[in-house]
Amino acid sequence: MRPAVLSLSLCAALITQQAPAQIVPEGMCAVTVASRPTLEDVRAYVENDLPDTFKSTLRVVQTRNGWYAIMIGDVPAESFERRKSDYMAQGLVPADTYCSAGKGFVAVVPQADYTSDTDVSEGTAPSDIRAHFIEAVKARAEQQGISFRLRYEGFSQVGTASDVENVVRSYLDLLDAAPGMYLDNILFASGSCVLIGPAIDAMAAFRMSGDVLAKTQDAGFGHLLLEKHPEAVPFFAGWGLFDGGIMRIAYEKEKEFWSFLDMGGFCE
């Protein structure tokens, strides 16, 4: 079995990350109006779709499946349906707004990570190039996702413990390398701007690593290991792959990517 190539920074982060305090108080529920896969998507929703009346009570929380829940406030659980009906009558919330007790929440996202105050300065990352980048990453990740799902279904049914460990180790490697060191060493070779081609490769790999590692947060994945591959359980538990720890690291890595981009924007 090959060893995982993980940097000291990722190892230290996994060790020091702590589970957050209870995000939704007992007896309350978070009024959740949307969920989005990336911070960039969250930012777009907040800027374009969220009514101004909710901006002061807005919270965004990362969940164990890697997505971000967008919440407009906490209400007593027993009054949620009445409050939702009132909001819908005013056209303030979508019909699929739901009440969340916070199960599966990993960490509260700082507001500065998804508000317009953190957008790049004018001219550093033209909106058309940025939009092309986001769409290209989604398409690439979707293609890679089809391949991964076929592989995952195969080893989950008949694979060995080493198969399970190896595929997750490979995505731990991706999470560590993309976008941090890869972006720093490769994308800025031409100067201060980011080359869009390699950036698509890096971010698609990073997105896939997040999607794959999110699989380990599903209850069914843990049951599968206990039933078919109990010898692999210590590896997963040791890397925070059952308690949401790895998804907090994925969140930090996504922030790292956008900080690189915001420094110089895409090369034109």
Image: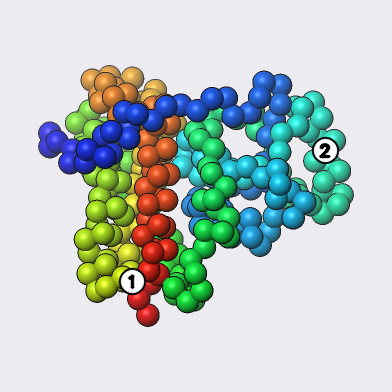
Q: Looking at the picture, does residue 60 appear above or below residue 105? A: below
The residue closer to the viewer here, 160 or 239, is: 239
In the picture, the quarter occupied by the C terminus is bottom left
Quarter of image, res 205? bottom left
Residue type beneath disc 2 = Arg
Query: Marks 1 and 2: CB-CB under 8 Å?
Result: no
Residue type beneath disc 1 = Cys
Q: Is residue 107 left or right of residue 97?
A: left
Q: Is residue 53 left or right of residue 233?
A: right
Q: Is residue 121 left or right of residue 230?
A: right
Disc 2, SS:
helix
Q: CA distance from mark 1 to mark 2?
A: 47 Å
The residue closer to the viewer here, 124 or 38, is: 124
- Please name the residue shown 27% across and 66% down the image: 187
Q: Is residue 146 visible?
A: no
Disc 1, SS:
loop
Quarter of image, res 3? top left
- Please name the residue shown 30% across and 46% down the image: 175
Q: Looking at the picture, does residue 49 appear above or below residue 242? A: below
Q: Looking at the picture, does residue 81 appear above or below residue 116? A: above
The residue closer to the viewer here, 28 or 169, is: 28
In the picture, the quarter occupied by the N terminus is top left
Measured as percent of width and height from the top left, residue 225 is found at 32, 24
Measured as percent of width and height from the top left, residue 169 is found at 24, 38
Measured as percent of width and height from the top left, residue 106 is found at 49, 33
N-term mark: 1 or 2: 2
Measured as percent of width and height from the top left, residue 90 is found at 86, 52
Badge 1: how crowded within 10 Å, few (<14), some, or many (20+)?
many
* Residue highlighted by disc 1: 193
Mark identifier at residue 83: 2
